[in-house]
């Protein structure tokens, strides 16, 4: 029989009963009531061999009656978990599971079924398709291949579609995958449409006002500083530039201009955040049922709100999350408003580093990560993690340190771009991300680096406050009791995300009946999403134990803290 620690915490405000709350006082902290003079508190914790009592409320709580607890009959197919995660759990146990999620950009190097499966085996949680490159037909085939991989091989890889945005960028380089710009070479940047092949050392630019906006002496920065040019002459629609910092030019790379040491922003004042092509791509993403849409060069929260209302109108049953890419000065100036409006954020360091001084990028990265966590929005750190591995099989030590810093900051996810899309060693690059993440996470726990971040209350209603405090308490209890795992039963994923926000030492098993919710949770730190066939999972905890034990993912005696968003409860028990 499982050992239960039953928590019964009741709060009464101004004489009328309110839903039960698990207080941080039960494990460490301070009173939660907003008006302590009118609030009475009672806490009980009783260990017993009996079924646990459950908190009840008028906000939708229920109880675990002995008659209903084992009513549903679940077979071995009633629970689904990512195949790579299942193998990791069986081999290494709870504590050795990776908490940081990994995103791979899919390109020519990784678009085949075998390559996609290799990435899934290697730990890819989200596959990113970049609408800057390739046709919609090509992207559609990649999406279908990922979906087939999930269905046939038992993975839960989510799909993120990244829009191109309206910023100035280069053309397709005449079909070449890359071109080397050498020091001192003269290149022509032109807005003209060439009927045949591009002349040598000529690059198309997508912005019609390009030649008018630049001035002789301006510095042209390509792809966040990978190559630099000096403007030396303007001839009609053509701009002649001398290469001052040689490097590799990639198709559709972003272009920025600096004048007298400052970024020239006026050129983009009239460009919309979402272009006409982006809207067509968004329609494509909605039709294909992608899990995330990442919007480039977000300038304000209004853009995010407009897009979310558009998605809702076009697909009322859609569960697509909108990710705001933070990669411009405008994004930084409106950071909190943008993140509040979005479903998550991406620190696009490459383009961001082209708009602010390089030495400011690390502090801005940490700030964005912290703001996202405080507001309970998943955050992705992206761009140039392992840039050298596009050509070489081993990263530089500085790149490894960069990865470890993002993991130490406890970002939800790390992303590979060119390393996986067109690099020669995509699987090795993913392995580096995975092994560094595992090692830094383990070091963080062994050194007992307790999280010092003060998480502000974000609830917008009393019901949300209950969920928030339950999750805060459950995470603290898990750390103090050294629990092996937290189990959460969730319909929408909200309570699971609140637990992830707390960054507990143990992994979080998130059980949901919805396939799209399961995939969406695959972006968030520490969550291991399961799909269960019964929506009566709250009353089948022991059946869940039985199924997980049968598959070797948990074992007798493991200490588990179970949280329910529908029952608004916490239970502490050993696996029977």
Image (spheres, rainbow, N blue to C red):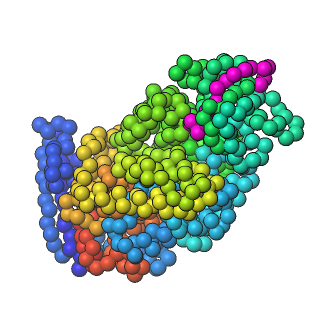
The image quadrant that residue 116 belongs to is: bottom right
Q: Residue furthest bottom?
A: 550
Q: Position of residue 23 (x, y in %)?
A: 19, 51
Residue at image point 27% right, 43% down: 453
Up the image or down, 557 lies above or below 200; here it is below
Left or right: where 464 falls relative to 385 = left
**Residue 244 visible in rendering:** yes
Left or right: where 125 falls relative to 105 = left
Q: Position of residue 337 (x, y in %)?
A: 44, 31
The image quadrant that residue 237 belongs to is: top right
Q: Position of residue 561 (x, y in %)?
A: 27, 64
**Residue 467 visible in rendering:** no
Residue at image point 35% right, 50% down: 408
Quarter containing the C terminus: bottom left
Residue at image point 46% right, 50% down: 399
Residue at image point 42% right, 79% down: 551
Is residue 487 magenta-colored? no
**Residue closest to the eye, 149 or 468:** 149
Left or right: where 63 falls relative to 135 = left
Most common secondary structure along the magenta stretch? strand
Q: Give, as a single range, the part of the protein colored magenta.
A: 222-238
């Amino acid at each position: 029989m499982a050992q239960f620690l039953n928590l019964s915490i009741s709060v009464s405000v101004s004489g009328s009963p309110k839903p039960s709350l698990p207080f941080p006082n039960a494990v460490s902290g301070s009173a939660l009531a907003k008006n302590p003079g009118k609030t009475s508190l009672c806490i009980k914790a009783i260990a017993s061999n009996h079924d646990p009592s459950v908190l009840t409320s008028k906000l939708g709580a229920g109880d675990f009656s002995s008659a209903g607890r084992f009513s549903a009959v679940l077979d071995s197919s009633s629970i689904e978990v990512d195949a790579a995660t299942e193998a990791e759990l069986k081999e290494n146990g709870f504590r050795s599971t990776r908490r940081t999620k990994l995103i791979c950009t899919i390109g020519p190097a990784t678009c085949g079924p075998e390559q996609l499966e290799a990435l899934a085996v290697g730990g890819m949680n989200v596959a990113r398709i970049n609408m800057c490159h390739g046709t919609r037909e090509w992207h559609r085939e990649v999406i279908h291949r990922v979906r087939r991989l999930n269905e046939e091989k038992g993975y839960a890889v989510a799909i993120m579609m990244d829009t191109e945005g309206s910023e100035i960028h280069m053309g397709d380089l005449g079909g070449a995958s890359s071109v080397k710009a050498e020091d001192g070479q003269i290149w022509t940047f032109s807005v003209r449409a060439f009927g045949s092949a591009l002349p040598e050392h000529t690059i198309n630019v997508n912005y019609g006002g390009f030649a008018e906006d630049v001035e002789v002496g301006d510095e042209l920065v390509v792809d966040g500083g990978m190559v630099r040019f000096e403007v030396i002459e303007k001839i009609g629609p053509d701009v002649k530039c001398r290469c001052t910092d040689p490097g590799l030019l990639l198709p559709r790379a972003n272009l920025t201009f600096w004048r007298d040491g400052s970024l020239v922003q006026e050129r983009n004042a009239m460009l919309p955040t979402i272009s006409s092509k982006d809207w067509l791509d968004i329609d494509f993403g909605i039709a294909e049922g992608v899990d995330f849409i990442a919007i480039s060069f977000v300038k304000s929260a209004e853009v995010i709100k407009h897009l979310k209302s558009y998605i809702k109108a076009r697909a009322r049953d859609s569960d697509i999350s909108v990710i705001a890419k933070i990669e411009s000065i405008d994004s930084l100036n409106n950071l909190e408003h943008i993140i509040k409006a979005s479903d998550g954020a991406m620190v696009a360091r490459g383009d961001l580093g082209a708009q602010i001084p390089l030495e400011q990028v690390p502090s801005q990265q940490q700030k964005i990560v912290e703001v996202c966590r405080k507001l309970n929005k998943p955050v992705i750190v992206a761009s140039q993690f392992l840039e050298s591995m596009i050509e070489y099989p081993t990263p530089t030590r500085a790149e490894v340190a960069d990865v470890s810093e993002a993991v130490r900051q406890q970002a939800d996810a790390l992303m590979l771009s060119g390393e996986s899309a067109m690099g020669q060693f995509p699987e090795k690059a993913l392995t580096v991300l995975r092994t560094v993440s595992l090692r830094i996470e383990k070091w963080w726990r062994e050194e007992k680096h307790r999280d010092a971040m003060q998480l502000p209350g974000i609830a917008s209603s009393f019901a949300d406050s209950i969920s928030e405090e339950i999750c805060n308490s459950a995470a603290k209890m898990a750390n103090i009791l050294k629990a092996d795992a937290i189990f959460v039963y969730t319909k929408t994923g909200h309570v699971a995300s609140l637990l992830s926000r707390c960054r507990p030492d143990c992994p979080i098993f998130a059980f949901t009946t919805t396939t799209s919710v399961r995939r969406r949770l695959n972006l968030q730190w520490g969550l291991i999403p399961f799909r269960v066939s019964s929506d009566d999972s709250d009353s089948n905890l022991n059946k869940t134990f039985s199924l997980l034990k049968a598959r070797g993912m948990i074992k007798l005696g493991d200490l588990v803290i179970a949280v329910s968003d529908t029952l608004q409860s916490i239970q502490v028990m050993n696996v029977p």
